[in-house]
Amino acid sequence: MEEYKRPLLEKDFPHSLIRLLRHREGDLSSQDLNQIYTPALLIWGKQDEVVPFKVGQKLASELPNANLIAYDQAGHLITEEKPVEVVEQILKFA
């Protein structure tokens, strides 16, 4: 966990992340997302500080066939923080 956290503590990380997000903004509009009918499983940590849970909620509301699963006491590294739960959800979804 410490190695994953280390880059987040770098002085310029927040600036770099904001630039990355701004560069990616507008990939798909809400209207575009509403046209995607493929089932989607979104697994989120409620304490995600990299991509906040509210982003997952918005995405789930815009994808017609999305299923949002959220876990308390989990952040951005959900696959490492809740590995058993994540695998169970993926297997149910498949």
Image: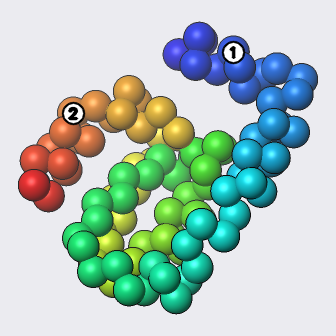
Q: Residue at x 57, y 46 (%)?
A: 47
Vertical side of 1 occupied by 63: above or below: below
The disc labelled 1 sits on which kind of residue? Arg
Q: Amino acid at mark 2?
A: Val
Q: Is residue 84 visible?
A: yes
User: Which residue in the rendered view is the most extreme toward the top?
Assistant: 3
Give the camera-side residue of 12 and 47. Answer: 12
Query: Mark 2, mark 1: which one is toward the viewer?
Result: 1
In the image, is 65 to the left or to the right of 20?
A: left
Q: Is residue 61 visible?
A: no
* Horizontal and vertical percent position of residue 91: 10, 47
Vertical arrangement, residue 16 with respect to residue 42, above or below: above
Rendered view: 60 above or below 55: below
Query: Disc 2, disc 1: CB below 8 Å?
Result: no
Image spot of residue 72 (x, y percent):
45, 48
Res. 31 mark: none
Q: Secondary structure at mark 1?
A: helix
Q: Position of residue 21 (x, y in %)?
A: 72, 52
Give the camera-side residue of 84 and 29: 29
Q: Is residue 88 left or right of residue 62?
A: left
Circle 2 packing at 10 Å, graded few (<14), some (14-19), many (20+), is: few
Which residue shows up at 19% across the image and 50% down it? Answer: 89
47 relative to 21 in the view: left or right: left
The answer to which image quadrant residue 63 occupies is bottom left
Asked where in the image residue 92 lies, by quadrant, the reply is bottom left
Q: Residue at x 72, y 26 (%)?
A: 8
Q: How many marks?
A: 2
Distance from label 2 to label 1 (Cα)? 25 Å
Kindly identify which residue carries mark 1.
6
Residue 84, numbered circle = 2
Quadrant occupied by the C terminus: bottom left
SS under mark 2: helix
